[in-house]
Amino acid sequence: MAASVNFLYYGDNLDVLRRHIKDDSVHLVYLDPPFESSQAYNILFAEQDGSKSASQFKAFEDTWEWNQAAAAAGRVANQERQRIERSEVIQSGRVSAA
């Protein structure tokens, strides 16, 4: 049950945590589902007296578009998911390699 560094786990979050991550190794899990709010979010600053400041900068945009890069990333993710599923099936002994 040792977690690997720089390793992508694909699947249900709770299942992955329970099966692959030691209980005492996780301090925070941050999930950011694709909300697609189509908005830009800014970091707002306050003056020393606590009043709002005009200063701000863009933190991120919650927008999404399907383009060639997204399609390529989707293909890679799908291939990796299929590879992992095949590996898990073979490791579990549910099927034998043909």
Image: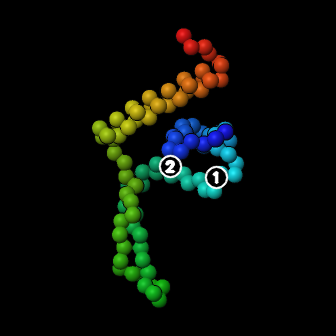
Horizontal and vertical percent for residue 87? 56, 25
Residue 33, labelled with which disc? 2
Residue 13 is marked as none
Give the camera-side residue of 41 and 59: 59
Q: Residue at x 65, y 23 (%)?
A: 92
Asked which quadrant contains residue 97, the reply is: top right
| Rendering quarter of residue 55 | bottom left
Asked if residue 35 lies left or right of residue 94, the reply is: left
Residue 39 showing in the rendered view: no
97 lies above or below 9? above
- Count of numbered labels shown in the rendering: 2
- Local secondary structure at mark 2: loop
Q: Are the residues at dot 2 and dot 1 in contact (C-beta closer than 8 Å)?
A: no
- Seen at 39% across and 60% down, the residue is 60
Quadrant in the picture for residue 93? top right
Q: Position of residue 39 (x, y in %)?
A: 38, 59
* Mark 2 residue crowding within 10 angstroms, few (<14) / some (14–19) / many (20+): few
Q: Residue at x 45, y 87 (%)?
A: 48
- The residue that label 1 is drawn on is 26
Regarding mark 1 in the picture, which secondary structure is present there? loop
- Extreme residue in the top direction: 98
33 to 87, vertically: above or below: below
Identity, as a three-letter code, of the amino acid under mark 2? Pro
Say which residue appears at 68% left-offset and 46% top-offset: 22
Q: How many residues crowd around disc 1 within 10 Å: few (fewer than 14), some, or many (20 or more)?
A: few
The N terminus - image quarter: top right
Vertical placement of 98 versus 61: above or below? above
Residue 95 position, x and y percent, is 62, 15
